[in-house]
Image (spheres, helix red, strand yellow):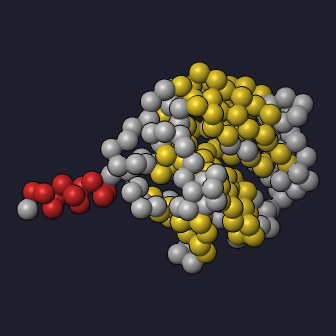
């Protein structure tokens, strides 16, 4: 009986896998956790911030990662180095645009990318996209053929680089499920 309880607890374990709904765009680094794996090491976070209505890069966006700040350059890029691998809150803000805060972003050892589209203040988004890369938290390797399901009805399988993308979603909250044999299932 104790063995059955241990197996049930193991199936319930998991590390938060971020799915970040950012106004008109959702993006994220999605992590599937190999049973028993733990994150360790140093992480780098980089990305590009763009205007959601025009697609233009946005300079001078204030990007905050748990109290550390930087601003995007003239090409809309930002970069944080020397972060401990782990879970962070990341905020993007610029005058004239809606502030976006992404909670529970799990940065793995090595390079992590988070590209963001900010919505101009007062301009409601008409569609949303959700995309990301599914990786093994222990090795950082992409996970091909992971099944990603949105709202229990829209299904895709990650490509050889672990990438997935959903377009033309209705802006708002969505349930996203990540599955792969040998990994814990994550539902966000």
Reply above or below: 36 against 77.
below
Q: Mark yes or no: residue 16 visible.
A: yes
Q: Is residue 176 visible?
A: no
Image height check: is 99 above or below 63? below
Q: Nearer the viewer, residue 146 or 104?
A: 146
Q: In this view, does 91 lie to the left or right of 117?
A: left
Residue 125 at what x, y percent from top left? 79, 62
Kindly identify the residue that appears in the image at 43 percent across and 48 percent down. 33
Does 173 sit left or right of 181 as displayed?
A: right
Q: Which residue is drawn at 39% across and 57% down?
A: 182
Give the quarter of the figure containing the N terminus: bottom left
Q: Which of 34 and 105 is in front in this view?
A: 34
- On screen, residue 126 above or below 103: below
The quarter of the picture where residue 70 lies is: top right
Q: Where is residue 40 in the image (x, y as percent from the top left)?
A: 44, 30
Q: Which residue lies furthest to the bottom in this view?
A: 153
């Amino acid at each position: 009986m104790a063995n059955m309880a241990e197996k049930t607890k193991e199936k319930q374990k998991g590390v938060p896998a971020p799915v970040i709904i950012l106004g008109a765009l959702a993006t994220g680094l999605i992590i599937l956790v190999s049973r028993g794996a733990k994150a360790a090491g140093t992480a780098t976070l980089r990305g590009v911030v763009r205007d959601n209505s025009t697609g233009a890069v946005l300079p001078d966006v204030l990007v905050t990662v748990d109290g550390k700040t930087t601003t995007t350059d003239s090409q809309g890029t930002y970069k944080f180095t020397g972060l401990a691998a782990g879970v962070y809150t990341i905020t993007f803000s610029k005058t004239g645009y809606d502030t976006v805060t992404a909670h529970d972003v799990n940065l793995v050892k090595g390079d992590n990318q988070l590209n963001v589209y900010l919505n101009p203040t007062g301009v409601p988004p008409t569609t949303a996209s959700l995309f990301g890369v599914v990786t093994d938290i222990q090795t950082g390797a992409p996970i091909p053929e992971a099944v990603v399901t949105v709202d229990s009805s829209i299904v895709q399988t990650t490509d050889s680089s672990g990438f997935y993308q959903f377009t033309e979603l209705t802006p708002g909250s969505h349930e996203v499920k990540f599955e792969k044999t040998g990994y814990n299932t994550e539902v966000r």
